[in-house]
Image (cartoon, rainbow, N blue to C red):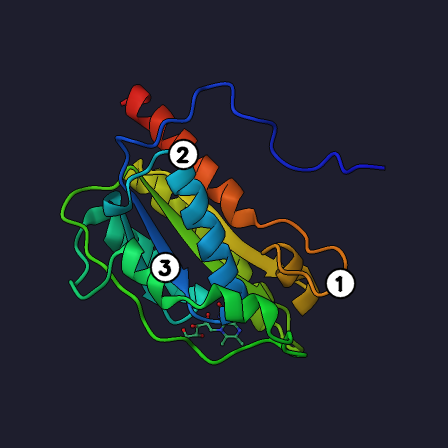
Amino acid sequence: MSSIKGPAPSTTTLDGSPLRVAIVHSRWNKTVIDALLAGTLAKLKALGVKESNIVIQSVPGSFELPLACSKVVSGSHVQAGATATDLLGGLNFGASMSSPRPSSRTSTPAPAVISMPSQPFDAVIAIGVLIKGSTMHFEYICESVTHALMRVQLDTGVPVIFGVLTALTDDQALERAGIGRGENKGHNHGEDWAAAAVEMASHTRRWA
Ligand code: DLZ
């Protein structure tokens, strides 16, 4: 039986061409992050968001996402960096998807890729991958990050898209990035986050 899960298509036309979108991503569990980032970027571009209007900021782990999103939205973070184009060139998606999957999560942070906005953003997408370990760390980070990201969007009025996977296993995370190890590759949730960003940014512009 097919799944009933997932978002129904938007009833409004999604036009990303006038929008400026920030992506803030953590560097823990890099294989999964890279795939999610690729899915997000591809869908943003498919919806018309210009590459020059997409900026990317990386942070060490998911716990750092709320503060970074808050700073990025207010335009007050420090400059250093690369554009979406540079990032796409830098990520080795082919290798990460075709090479053998790690048997345990990749916990070494990848190099920082950062870019700087010169004007406000219409939406920010927070991407992180939390995978449950043997302590309570996972629960505390999941809960605090979720609440803090919600607070950023309510406090600023700028949509913050919740692109944080909270997976109980490595396989769950891989499948939600469309790179599952089995026959079921799963679905890349980054595509949904990009669509949500464009839709919410468009709504928010109209509601202003
Ligand atoms: C420390 C930690 C652990 C154990 N696991 C993850 C994880 O699965 N995903 C993730 O994004 N970050 C993890 N971190 C790092 C924390 O988010 C944070 O970067 C550090 O505790 C420093 O504040």
Q: Looking at the rendering, in which quadrant would you find the N terminus?
A: top right
Residue nearer the viewer, 66 or 200: 200
**Crowdedness near tag 2: few (<14), some (14–19) or many (≥20) residues, C-alpha within 10 Å:** some
Q: Which mark is residue 69?
A: none
Q: Quadrant of residue 123?
A: top left
On the image, the x and y values in percent for residue 36 come to 50, 56
Image spot of residue 56 (x, y percent): 30, 56
Q: Is residue 88 above or below residue 133?
A: above
Residue 203, position as x, y percentages in the image: 37, 24
Q: Amino acid at mark 2?
A: Leu
The first of marks 3 and 2 along the sequence is 2
Location of mark 3 (residue)? 88
Label number found at residue 47: 2
Question: Mark 1 is on which residue type?
Answer: Gly
The residue lying at 40 percent from left, 48 percent from top is 125
Instruction: Identify the secondary structure beneath mark 1.
Output: loop
